[in-house]
Amino acid sequence: MAGVSAPKTPAVAPGRWIVPLSDVAIDADMLAAAEETLASGWWSMGPRVAEFEERFAAFSGARHAIAVANGTAALHVALLAVGCGAGDEVVLPSLNFVAAGNTIVHTGATPVFCDIVGERDLNLDVADVEAALTERTRAVVLLHYGGFPCDVAAVRELCHLRGIAIVEDAAHAVGSLYEGRACGTLGDVGCFSFFSNKNLPIGEGGMVVTDDDEVAARLRLLRSHGMTSLTWDRHRGHAAGYDVVTPGFNYRLDEVRAAVGSVQLAKLPGRNAARRERSSRYREELEGREGIVVPFSDTADSAHHLAVVVLPPESPREELRAALSAEGIQTSVHYPPMHRFSAFAAAGDRRALPRTDELADRILTLPLYAHMTDEQQDSVVESLLGALKSPSATAD
Ligand SMILES: Cc1ncc(COP(=O)(O)O)c(C=O)c1O
C-alpha cells in the first residue's frame, strides 16, 4: 500500500542501546492495518476490537475475550468482577509487577504477599499460598513468571474447596500452555497485557478472558462506565439509549490498536518460538558458568517472555548492570518485590518472604526479543561472564 515498503526490523535499537532489553519488530502488515483503520474514520471501540476479541478467544480457547485499555485495567476489572472489595484479602506473590498489588488496593481489598519456590522456579510457592489464606481471602492472583506456568493444579485444589477465585496475571504468558490449555484460561479470569515490551505488543492494551457468562457481562459493563450500550451499538442503530447499572470505567481499547493486535496475534506463535530458541541459547551459554543459575526450563509450554538469570549470592548486581550498560546492553530487574515498596509497607500483616527477599537481590533480566541476532546475544553472554569475573574492571 502507498507509503509502506518492505518489512522493516531495526537492526540496531533506538537510542544508545546496542542490545535493548526488548524491541518491537515493525512490518508492513502492521503499518497497513493502522493506516486502514485511521482512514476508516471509526477510531473508538468498534468492529476491529470485536474482531481482535474473537480472534483472541479462538486463540486462547476462552469463551469470552474482552479487550481493555491495558493489562492494569484488565486486572482491575477482573478483581471487581470476581467480587473483590472492602474487607477482602487477595493473596499474590510479592515478586510480580506492582499493577497486581495496586489494583487489589483499588478494589478496597488488602494484598497479602506470598513467597516464591526458589532459584530454579520463581513462581509462587503453593505451600506459602496455603499458609496465607484466611477466612477473608476472596481471590488468589497467579503470575506465570516470565511466561512459565505456575503450579495451577495445586492452587486450584486450595481455592475450589474454599470458594476462592483465581485471577491469572497472564501478562507474561500470552501463548503459554499448562497441561495443554492456554494460560489465562485456567482460573476464573485471565488478564493479558499488550504493552510495548510484551510478546504481543500494540503500545498499550490488554485482554480479559473468562468462560463464565456472568463474569463476562460484568467485565463488559465495568470496561465502559457500567453502560448497557456502547457508542458503536448506537451508531449502528442497535440501541437508542442506555442505562448505567454499575459505576464503571473507561477502560476501552481503540480500533487502531485492536487492528494492530490482530496482526500481532497472527505472528505470535512464530515469535514465541524464536524467543524460545534465544532462551535455550542463554541456558546453554550461561547455566553453571560463574555461578549463574538459569531458572525454569526450555519448555515449549512457555511464552519465554523474560530471560532471567539468578546471580551467585552477594553479586554486585548494580555494578554488573553498569558494566553491561557501558557496553550498550540494557538489563532490568523483574521485579523489585512489592512488599518492599512504601505504598505496601502497611498492607496486611507482614509475612516472612525469605526466598523472595533473597532472590530479589540476585535476579537479573537480560535482553530478549524474537528478532535478536546471534551477535547481539553473544555480546550479552560475553559481557555478563566478563563482568562476573571482574565486575569493577569492566564497569570503568
Ligand atoms: C506481570 C504484569 N502484570 C501486569 C502488567 C500491567 O500491564 P500494563 O502495563 O499493560 O498495564 C504488567 C506490565 O508491565 C506485567 O508485566
Image (cartoon, helix red, strand yellow):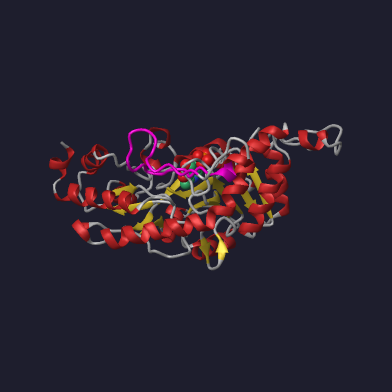
Viewed as shown, does residue 44 lie left or right of 389? right
Task: Tell me if residue 102 comes above or below residue 372 in the rendering.
Answer: above
Q: Is residue 68 above or below residue 389?
A: above
- Front residue (pair 130, 307): 307
Q: Can residue 290 be seen in this view?
A: yes
The quarter of the displayed image where residue 206 is located: top right
Q: Is 246 left, or right, of 177 in this rendering? A: right
Is 14 magenta? The answer is yes
Residue 108: x, y in percent?
56, 37
Principal SS element in the magenta part?
A: loop
> Could you say which is closer to the camera, residue 105 or residue 100?
100
| Quadrant location of the C terminus in the rendered image | top left
Residue at screen point 39% across, 41% down: 339
| Side of 359 relative to 52 (left or right) | left
The residue range painted magenta reads: 8-30
Can residue 175 be seen here? no
User: In percent of the image, x 46 and y 44: which residue is there?
Assistant: 9
**Foreground residue among 198 and 139:** 198
Q: Which residue lies furthest to the bottom in this view?
A: 179
